[in-house]
Amino acid sequence: ECTLPGDKSLTHRVALFAALAEGESRVGNFLRAGVTQAMLGALSDFGVDWALDGDTLIIQGRGPSELHSPKNVLNCGNSGTTLWLLAGALAGANVSCILDGSSGLRTRPMGRIVEPLCAMGVRIQAAPGDVAPLTLESRPEGEALQALEISLPVASAQVKTAILLAGLGAQGTTDLREPGPSRDHTERLLASMGVEIMRDPQIHRVRLQPPDSPLRPLNLDLPGDISSAAFLIVAALIVPGSDLLLKGIGLNPTRVGLLDVLQKMGASIEFHNLKEVHGEPMGDLRIQTSELVGIRVEGPLVVRMIDEFPIFAVAAALARGKTTVSEAEELRHKESDRISSLCRELHNMGVKIEEKPDGFVIEGGVRPRGGVCVASHGDHRLAMALSVAGLAAEEPTGVEGAEIINESFPEFTAILRGFGAEATS
Ligand code: S3P
């Protein structure tokens, strides 16, 4: 039985949105990890006062007009969310800065936010090749941002959030549509802070009205991260004799695609103590070892489990029959090219997996051989997924570069050890 650190997407948002609000915010179960440290470090550079008391973040919001343009280049580390969300918020706040990050972050596509922000009148530029660093220049007084009406080509919560945050400081109504249901934490949180947000979930449309009064500060405890829970859920399903209770986990419908898929594959997952906190559904999950069968994943389901494909592939490797993932080319733009890195490393462990341009096919039902050292490719979720595959493998498995796990889930190895796994570093 265990509880988990706060959701990563919510942690990024509460820290940034609280800095844009006016007044003191207090947020419990704040995720203390590499990527969220990158956001807090950046907020310090803008002159925001914050402190951590254990895992409670206390932040003094003074509104967007009090953010200073920093002298130094902002280091977003490995965190795409930090970089993209900051770019939108800083554009709305009219701050100058250079946003940069690790060599991994410098390979990720920037055009998808630079183009819409430019169309709003933001002075923003990517480095040649459409990559970080991003240079943001403040506008002269009197030059206002114009709200955008836009249909995004790819469903992406990070892109959507950047545009909505810029829209907070623009003239007119921002009107945005997506091809699928990307996570909606931004909409739920901003609404709870007093912003007028109109939504039509059937057509994935959001409209935002710039607020007349300051954002209200936040006071809440964050739910546990469903994307971190996913590793323990699959571990429990595939390690014989497991019975696991995860308490207080975020169950936002835009995030629980993996649970829907696993249940269809035959997983025993029970939901208990369901409630809603600040517009976010949460509850307890009980998982017991189950016989799984292969499945097909495509369409709108893909975005509802976008971060879970590495660990889903491990479940599929142990499931009887064939699993096919398609329409998931977006996975190539995550912390690693998650189609090619996943296929290469699971293949090295003895899994029958075939790479496709937009997904992969697995012939499951056989324990991975293990007995090899696989690579994390600088990708925290790949490192954790391979570790869980190692739990089910015939021979011990090494995961090279596993320290990258600290980016999102520093407690991962200790929790697995607590459940009896043999893990050494
Ligand atoms: C995130 C959105 C997802 C996800 C990322 C965090 C967010 O990306 O992969 O880890 O916090 O908004 P996209 O929805 O932009 O693809």
Image (cartoon, rainbow, N blue to C red):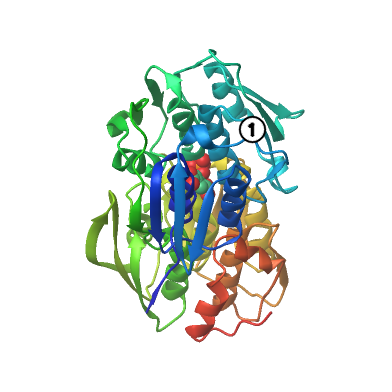
In-image side of 364 versus 278 (left or right)? right
Q: Quadrant of the C terminus?
A: bottom right
Q: Residue at x 75, y 29 (%)?
A: 129
- Residue 381 in the image: state x and y as whole percent: 58, 59
Disc 1 is placed on an element classified as loop
Q: Residue at x 67, y 68 (%)?
A: 402
- Residue 110 in the image: state x and y as whole percent: 64, 32
- The answer to which of 365 and 38 lies nearer the viewer is 38
Classify 94 as above or below 37.
above
Q: Residue at x 46, y 52 (%)?
A: 59
- The answer to which of 332 and 124 lies nearer the viewer is 124
Which residue in the protein does label 1 denote?
110
Q: Quadrant of the N terminus?
A: bottom left
- Residue 258 in the image: state x and y as whole percent: 40, 56
- How many numbered marks, from 0 up? 1
The quadrant in which residue 71 appears is: top right
Work out which residue is located at the far top of the displayed protein and give it: 142
In-image side of 307 versus 404 (left or right)? left
- The kind of residue tagged 1 is Met
Q: Is residue 267 visible?
A: no
Q: Is mark 1 within 8 Å of ligand 1?
A: no
Label 1 neighbourhood size at 10 Å, few (<14), some (14-19), many (20+)?
many
- Residue 156 in the image: state x and y as whole percent: 49, 37
Q: Is residue 152 visible?
A: yes
In-image side of 214 versus 352 (left or right)? left
The quadrant in which residue 284 appears is: bottom left
Q: Residue at x 36, y 34 (%)?
A: 214
